[in-house]
Image (tube, helix red, strand yellow):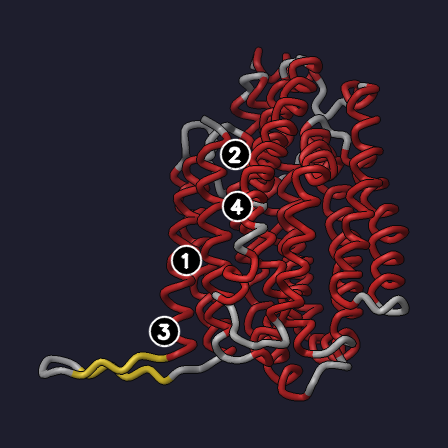
Amino acid sequence: MLALPVLAEQAFIMVMGVVNTIMAGRLGKEAVSAIGMVDSINNIFISFFSALAIGGTVVVAQYYGQRNTRKANDAARHTVYASLLISLCITIALLVFRNSIARLLFGAAERAVMDNALIYLKITLFTYPLIALTSVGCGVLRGAGDTRTPMKITIFMNFLNIVLSYIFIYGINIQNSHFDINIPGAGVKGAAYGIAVARTVGALLICFVLLNGSKIIKLRIERHFKPDWNILASIFGIGFPASMESLLFNGGKLITQIFIVGMGTASIAANTIAGSVFGLINIPGTALSIAATTMVGQYMGRGEGEEAKGVIIYLTKITSLCMLVIAVVAFPLAKLLVSAYTTNTDVIPIAVSVIRTSVVSMPLLWALSFLVPAGLKGAGDARYTLLVSVISMWVFRVTMGYVLGVPLGLGVLGVWFGMYIDWVVRGILFYIRLMRGKWKNNIVIRKDRIVSDLIE
């Protein structure tokens, strides 16, 4: 009941993302390369806001596990306010320094690629507060056990994105005796407009749900808001390490993107396409990881540590099995999948080789590397996951990706091999942590406070 709506939501997100990339790919390798480069920046902050939302998800989940509705709502309100403030600060800073950041990171790109990238970045960065609001809103609803509402909002938002992006990218010209509609295509700028409008609608919908109230969560707007520092400490005790983990982890991915920029436009395009297919293959893993955080949080709120461990182990096995089934189908169809994005003969062989190595590696390594830490975060073990993720990323993925990709000449494939090495290290360390059980001693919310709140 909890995981299937998340699975449907993630499936729709990934499918819509694939369609978006295909539409950009039809504009040429310069356009898809520009969008891929900027999205490597955007995804850092999208992941950052999602990670910040984990703090709210876990705290709400643990209060929900204790059936403490009032505190669950207080936690939701504090998470929304804090995330909006942080996202506004980030947006202003990036707006001021966007050109310098883009040229610093992607200065080796061709002129046409860079021009498109600056256009796309300028428009999409204004959507950061909208992303933060939607991420946090969906997160606190999931923490309270409501995964259907986020699913509906996300599916509608992504469907709207596809429709609007198609119109804005390619334009439409409809003429008959009753009306005349002529919207010129705007290319990369149109892709940015489509996603901006869709994110605006998504944020408005999540606000409507939170303000009107779901089964558990109802956001009250207070004229004189007084922060509860104990709740904020609980939220940021998980959300801050998770956000730093996401920021540093995705910062490492951005560095590997810079390696690829120096390899040429065909390599950039191939990496973008392979990443899109990777996300499609990884739908079960992403969905079950989200479910793991909520489920473990609810078990830990009830003080059921062994049951929480059992959930993590079970979901790890299920995720690996799902990925194995998908890999068996995707490996022989890799060239067909890539051909849906582009017909460029320089791009196709690079992307195919990357996809085939990834589908071999994922069933063996991904679940231990990512689902297990998602469950550990649900128990409040965010500091350990931060430490492992950052060290593994920067010592193994970045370093080995550079060595294999640049000096040893393996190109994009070498950068991805560095990622697989990172998965091995992460998986081993997270498995040891899970089995030793020290994470079950974490305290996110104090039981003495919960009891007094229930009495009140």
Looking at the picture, how far across and down is residue 32, in whole percent? Answer: 57, 73
Disc 3 is placed on an element classified as helix
Q: Measured from the top left, where is residue 432 in percent x and y?
A: 83, 26
Which is more foreground, mark 4 or mark 3? Answer: 4
Q: Give the CA distance from mark 1 to mark 3.
A: 17 Å
Q: Give the foreground label among 3 and 2.
A: 3
Q: What is the three-letter code of the residue carrying label 2?
A: Arg
Residue situated in front as seen by the camera: 157 or 426: 426
Figure check: 95 above or below 181: above
Indicate left or right for 366 with 191 as reference. Answer: right
Lower position in the chain sequence, tag 3 or tag 2: 2
- Kindly identify which residue carries mark 2: 142
Res 76 seen here:
no
- Which residue is the site of mark 1? 201
How busy is the neighbourhood of tag 1: few (under 14 within 10 Å), some, or many (20 plus)? some
| Numbered disc in front, either 4 or 2 | 4
**Mark sitting earlier along the chain (4/3):** 3
**Which numbered tag is attached to residue 167?**
3
